[in-house]
Image: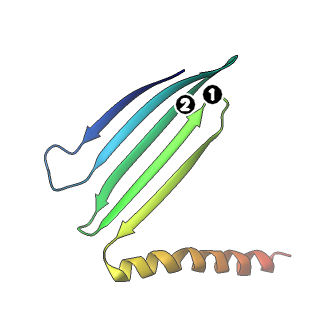
C-alpha cells in the first residue's frame, strides 16, 4: 500500500522562468513496517542559460540523500563546471598530503 501527498509551486509572475519547488510525502507500508518519506525538489534559473536543481530526501529510518545538479547551454560554463570538481579533488590531495 502506498499513499502520496504532493504539493507543487511554480513561478507565477514570470511564465518564461522555470523556477519550481515540489514537496512530496509518500507513506509506504510493507508487512509490519511503516515508512514515511519526505522529498523536497527545487529548480531555479541562474541567469539566462543556467539551471540549478536540488533534491533532498529523508525517511523515518534517518537515511536519505542530497543531490545538486547544474545544467547550462553555454559551453564555457559547462567546461568550468566539469573542471571545478577535478581542481578541488587535486587541491585536497595536495593539501592533505602535506599534513602527513
The CA distance from mark 2 to mark 1 is 7 Å
Q: In the drawing, does residue 21 fall left or right of residue 67?
A: left
Question: What colour-coding does the image apply?
Answer: rainbow
Residue with the most extreme top position: 32
Q: Secondary structure at mark 2?
A: strand
Q: Is residue 23 above or below residue 3?
A: below
Instruction: Work out whether residue 93 or residue 42 is closer to the camera in this orientation and state it.
Output: 42
Residue 50 position by quadrant: bottom left
Q: In the rendered image, which quarter contains the N terminus? A: top right
Q: In the rendered image, which quarter contains the C terminus? A: bottom right
Badge 2: few (under 14), some or many (20 or more) residues near its Cα, within 10 Å? Answer: some
In this rendering, the count of numbered labels is 2
Instruction: Work out whether residue 1 or residue 58 is closer to the camera in this orientation and state it.
Output: 1
Q: Is residue 89 above or below residue 40?
A: below
In the rendered image, residue 8, in percent from the top left (x then y), is placed at: 31, 36
Look at 34% across and 42% down and name the residue there: 21
Q: Secondary structure at mark 1?
A: loop
Residue with the most extreme right position: 100
C-beta proximity under 8 Å, tags 2 and 1: yes
In the rendered image, residue 64, in percent from the top left (x then y), is placed at: 61, 41
Look at 34% across and 31% down and name the residue there: 7
Q: Earlier in the sequence, mark 2 or mark 1?
A: 2
The residue to which callout 2 is attached is: 37
In the rendered image, residue 29, in percent from the top left (x then y), is placed at: 60, 21
Q: In the drawing, does residue 54 fall left or right of residue 18?
A: right
The residue to which callout 1 is attached is: 60
Residue 62 position by quadrant: top right
In the rendered image, residue 86, in percent from the top left (x then y), is placed at: 59, 78
Amino acid at each position: 500500500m502506498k499513499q502520496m501527498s504532493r504539493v507543487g509551486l511554480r513561478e507565477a509572475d514570470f511564465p518564461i522562468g522555470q523556477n519550481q519547488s515540489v514537496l512530496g510525502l509518500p507513506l509506504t507500508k510493507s508487512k509490519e513496517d511503516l515508512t514515511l518519506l519526505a522529498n523536497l525538489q527545487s529548480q531555479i534559473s541562474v541567469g539566462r542559460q543556467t539551471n540549478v536543481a536540488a533534491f533532498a530526501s529523508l525517511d523515518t529510518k534517518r537515511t536519505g540523500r542530497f543531490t545538486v545538479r547544474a545544467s547550462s547551454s553555454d559551453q564555457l560554463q559547462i567546461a568550468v563546471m566539469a573542471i571545478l570538481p577535478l581542481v578541488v579533488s587535486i587541491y585536497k590531495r595536495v593539501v592533505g598530503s602535506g599534513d602527513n
